[in-house]
Amino acid sequence: MKVGFIGLGVMGRPMALHLQRAGHELHVWARRPASLEGLAATVCATPAELGRQCEVVFTVITSSADVEAVALGPDGLSAGMAAGSVLVDCSTIAPDVERRIAARLGEQGIHMLDAPVSGGAQGAIDATLAIMAGGEAAVLERVRPLLACLGQRIVHIGPNGAGQVAKACNQMIMVAAIQATAEAMRLAAAAGVDCARVKQALAGGSAASRVLDVMGERMVKRDFAAGIEARLHHKDFGLVREAARQSGVPMPLTAAVDQQLNSLMAQGWGRDDTASLLRVLELA
């Protein structure tokens, strides 16, 4: 299949390579030429050109505005994609924006899935991502073999936008767990207890989690180099806040974690790992 890919960053590049290794013909477009270095794929001059050449296009882009521009802007995908083709957006953006894009593309007969992913950079490399899909079930089944190249769990959540709601829920739980891990490590250190041993003990009990394993280890080693940059989690929490406002749902724990992320950003640590939430606590 001719597959397009836009967004060749920490997550997108390994995802695109998995599709290529599975035998699909890869077409790419990037705003930054450096993203294309070492990638053996057909390079397109614009998203519209890429859309004209591909049956399915994947996007993994940071912001709602950028996804909308790539999909609907001048020389965007909508100017090139044929009726019946599919846009699979694996970005993390606002559900209402996803619905708006899907509706506009639908007017041209172009299908869209919002299919945000969870699992981080290592999950993208290992092709073990969790994929939360919003859109028509029949369209999901059509592209499921492609998604199976990227992840092990593919769940149809509901109509367009539903995948993004599920991703917001994922981010709420995950970042709250990072904050809880940071507080546990801070308490252990303040009490003069070996943080590495505390983490080892917790990993064998009810507190065991992937977040404790990965983020706890980074905190113990004080390795704050970015896995996923904290600024992205800060951006995601902005989406969560807006979704909560629109739904009228109180989220006190999420609000507290959001404030910690704001403090992290104020310290200039946005391009460091979210394990830097530990350093925020150490400022007090």
Image: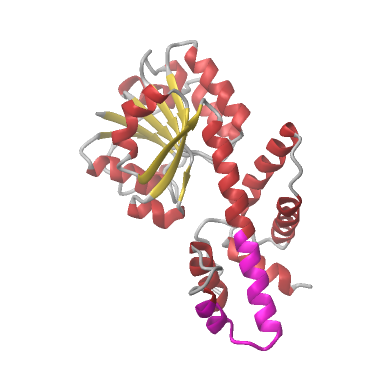
In the image, is residue 33 above or below residue 96? below
Quadrant of the rendered image containing residue 111: top left
Name the outermost residue toward the front.
206
Quadrant of the rendered image containing residue 153: top left
Residue 194 seen in render = yes
- Where residue 29 appears, x then y in whole percent? 40, 34
Q: Left or right: 226 with respect to 243?
A: left
- For the N terminus, the image quarter is top left
Q: Left or right: 248 with respect to 164?
A: right
Q: Which colour scheme is used?
A: secondary structure
* Residue nearest the observer in this picture, 177 or 4: 177
- For the C terminus, the image quarter is bottom right
- Where residue 61 appears, x then y in whole percent? 50, 39
Q: Which residue is drawn at 76% across and 51% down?
A: 252
Asked if residue 239 is among those painted magenta in the image, a careful observer would answer no
Name the outermost residue toward the right.
284
Name the outermost residue toward the bottom.
192
In the image, is residue 157 above or below residue 284? above
- Where residue 202 appears, x then y in whole percent? 54, 75
* Residue nearest the observer in this picture, 252 or 112: 252
- Tell me where the magenta segment starts and ends, as one range: 177-201
Asked if residue 183 is among those painted magenta in the image, a careful observer would answer yes
Q: Residue at x 36, y 46 (%)?
A: 151
Quadrant of the rendered image containing residue 108: top left
In the image, is residue 151 above or below residue 276? above
- Where residue 228 appears, x then y in whole percent? 52, 56
**Is the magenta region chiefly helix, strand or loop?**
helix
Q: Which residue is drawn at 33% across and 30% down?
A: 143
